[in-house]
Amino acid sequence: MTLLTKAAFNGGMKSFIFVFYRQMAGTIFLLLWVVMFERRSAAPLTLPVFFKIFALAFLGITLGVNLYGIALVYTSSSLVSVIYNCLPVSTFCFAVLLRKEKLNVRKIAGVAKLGGIAICMGGVATLAFFKGPILNPPFALHNAQYEPQRQHHVSTFGSTKWIVGCFLSFFSVSSWGLWYVLQIGVLKTYPSKLHFTSIQCLLSTIQSFLVAIAMERDLSEWKLTWNVTLLAVLYCGIMVTAIAHYLQSWVIASKGPVFLAMSTPLNSTLTTICSMFLLGESINVGSIVGEIMLVGGLYSVLWGQTQEPNLATESSLPVQVENECINAENEEPKNAETCYLAK
């Protein structure tokens, strides 16, 4: 997603227009999926739930993805993917504030969590304010037609836009962390995950269109051509907006938001390597140091989490126990007291 999006922006695609096309492609795919598989099993949608989904669509997609796109234009795909490693930390912070996760500062596990958060913040500051020597890739497989624009991008965008891009990327990650945590309550009242994802994508498409038409009035910028831009729109729309968001709702409902956010560490390393050899992007020493700090802080938080039981796991226990009790039928359950409490 990061590499194709950056390639589309290098080809001249505007970020706001790209987000709209991406959401529209994902919405069409999801609506076709709903018609084919769950047309008659739609859960009743109340007005309060609709407004909650509307707010989630704005927070996690319209706001978060547009901030992500601007940050990607101002910086590089490798840097944005590195800051994306802050997602588990931001998700954990919001989970603690909203009482979805435990934090005991009197134990070593709690100290490890707080220390990891501090290290991650230091990594973000290092990425923003310290660059160091530039490391150029020995070769690149990117399209030669993007080279002049890439050089113009490097020479024109100075330190101010680089710093702004770093913080916009961090704000985007923060909005996604809060988005993950808030989905728990909505999925409890509206458990149909395919319909939830479809409605969310449809609402975000409308919101993204309003943002794009307000920011980009030139109709010539809205044209799609048969190049990497169209490929990026289809891939990000179908694979990320539709399929990935649908799978994320399953993980959040069963394991909690922090468990989902734990799946991000390898993203920055793979994107940095691929952006150097596929897009020809340079990387500086500051990015490497900041990446090491982010990964170190991340695993400090994750280690602390493994040492303490979290509320998200405990909240799913009654459902699991209830299923075990139901499957037991007439047989005596292994733990009669637990089954009684679950009922």
Image (spheres, rainbow, N blue to C red):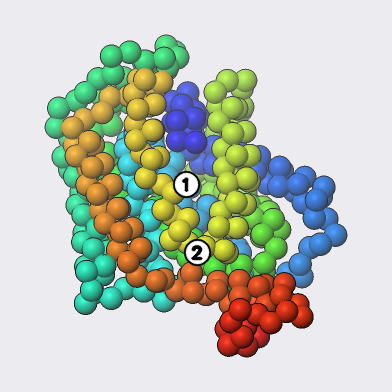
* Label 1, residues with CA under 10 Å away: few <14, some 14-19, many ≥20: many
Q: Badges 2 and 1: C-beta atoms under 8 Å apart?
A: no
Q: Residue at x 61, y 67 (%)?
A: 187
Quarter holding the C terminus is: bottom right
The numbered mark at residue 256 is 2
Foreground residue among 270 and 284 = 270
* Element under disc 2: loop
Q: Is residue 179 visible?
A: no
Quick one: which residue is furthest to the right in this view? Answer: 40
Q: Return the x and y of residue 232 as percentages of the image width and height.
A: 55, 31
Report crowding for label 2: few under 14, some 14 to 19, many 20 or more residues within 10 A (C-alpha): many
- Identify the mark nearer the N-term, 2 or 1: 1
Q: Considering depth in this image, is 307 or 130 the residue closer to the camera?
A: 307
Quadrant for residue 92, please give it: bottom left
Which residue, given by chain and number where applicable, does mark 1 sit on? 66
Q: Where in the figure is residue 277, as x and y percent of width and height?
A: 36, 20
Secondary structure state at the residue bearing disc 1: helix
Q: Nearer the viewer, residue 57 or 256?
A: 256
Residue 254: which quarter of the image? bottom right
